[in-house]
Image (cartoon, rainbow, N blue to C red):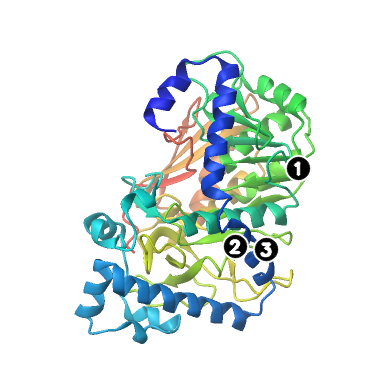
Amino acid sequence: MNSHLSRFYSFCPVVLQDLLLTGYSFVLDQQRYRGDFAAYRDLLDQSQWNSEDQLEACQEDALQRLIAHAYNTVPYYRNVFNSLKLVPADIKTIHDLQKLPLLTKKDVKRHFNDLVSSSYKLKELKPGHTSGTTGSPLEILYDSHTIFMTYAALDRQYRWADVSLKRFGDRIAVLRGNVIVPLTQSKPPFWRHNYLHNQLLFSSFHLSPSNLPHFLEKLESFAPVVLDGYPSTLYIMAKYLQSIERTFPLKAVISSSETLYDFQRAVIEERFECKMFDYYALAERVVFATECDRHDGHHVCSEYGITEIIEDDGMPVSSGKLGRLVGTGLHNYGMPLIRYVTDDMTAMKPYQCACGRSLPLMEDVATKAEDIITLKDGRLISSSTLTHPFKPMTSIEGSQIIQEDYDHIKIKLIPNQTYAESDSRHLIHEFQERLGADVKIDIEFINELPRTKSGKFKWVISYVDLGI
């Protein structure tokens, strides 16, 4: 919503807020699901079963069209090509992309206007923003094809989970960063309705222990078939169910926007008696990756963009090795991002999924400087590795890991009544086993875990230089 509508919304009674959210959803639908959306949805239905060679051929055909468009209508890329004495015909294959320089966030901010295609008027492009969790937010402009393709990819993820996103479709409860309830509100309702998409939107900013019974009571009356949210908010609900020895059966749980840890997945799937489907997407619209029913990693949507995993020197890494994620969106002609360097790190799996799809499989994504621990000897410790000390523990309700320095780790904990000194000794021992005996481990007890303005939560935060 724009600022004027948001202010009006904040003064409205709950019933009118529900109607405003539903009306706003109708406006967004016109941008997301009309035009070429159906064509992209049909394309993704068919292409998911293409062979690896067919997928690569389609990528290269789309890349050649994008490169020609960028050279002819985007001043930034015309200058890049001219400075390197290249012409569009020099970029024919995925491997030819390495002839072009990487595009960083600083480059986008510095050359913002020159990255916009002259084929579009600014009013024809829609603005998007990164969350800013790893620094200052970044603004990107999209054309309509980018929006249609993005929601077609999201629609495919939902259909892989056997859930319908259509209007008046399956009942969906949402636990994301929607600021839909005044932050000062202390009594329910902590939720609002989007009647158009049969959604119940919960406020993740009100997930306190005293409010959780109200959340569960509303879930029971709404009776959703799927729960969609951040891993951390879903985990809070699952832990509450665990604490009262209850389950809440669903068809599926869908998560995104944060790293999903295996300890979170285990509790969520146990308490909601279903599988989780996690997807990875970027506000920059260069990479989209989704999880199929085999749950063996994230399928990179080759139809959406070209994904590279690179070393710190810009060279491609070998399959299975951790590296920096770089993406080239194939559909945003309004503001093309070619070889855009993300803040994220991952690896490609060296095999194809047993589901029969040739879409490449990507490991879980770790966010630079927030999900990676960097040690003095240069080792990079994935956050997934740090989940293991917590697995046998039932005495904590929440945790966060802060790297203060190369040899100093702080573990923030929300303990329950069963927590004992032996639990602290266990954590310190297990962390030093993984990081080294010379790493100092401090434990701090807290009452609440911090969240960003968008409602997100980071389990691992590092304040040291990653070196990449």
Q: Classify the position of the N terminus by image quarter.
A: top left
Which residue is located at x 60 percent, y 83 percent?
53
Please tell me whether mark 3 sits on a helix, a strand or a loop.
loop
Distance Cα–Cα, label 3 vs label 2 = 25 Å
**Crowd band around label 2 with a 10 angstrom C-alpha radius: few (<14), some (14–19), many (20+):** some
**Crowd band around label 3 with a 10 angstrom C-alpha radius: few (<14), some (14–19), many (20+):** some
Among the two numbered marks 3 and 1 on one chain, the one whose residue lies closer to the N terminus: 1
Q: Which residue is mark 3?
A: 296
Please tell me whether mark 2 sits on a helix, a strand or a loop.
helix
Among the two numbered marks 3 and 2 on one chain, the one whose residue lies closer to the N terminus: 2
At label 2, which amino acid type do we have?
A: Tyr
Q: Position of residue 451 (x, y in %)?
A: 46, 34
Residue 377 visible? yes
Q: Position of residue 226 (x, y in %)?
A: 72, 41
Among the two numbered marks 1 and 2 on one chain, the one whose residue lies closer to the N terminus: 2
> Is disc 1 in contact with disc 2, using a CB cutoff of under 8 Å?
no
Residue 293, image quadrant: bottom right
**Dot label at residue 270:** 1
Residue 101 visible? no
Which residue is located at x 29 percent, y 67 percent?
74
Q: Is residue 422 left or right of residue 126?
A: right
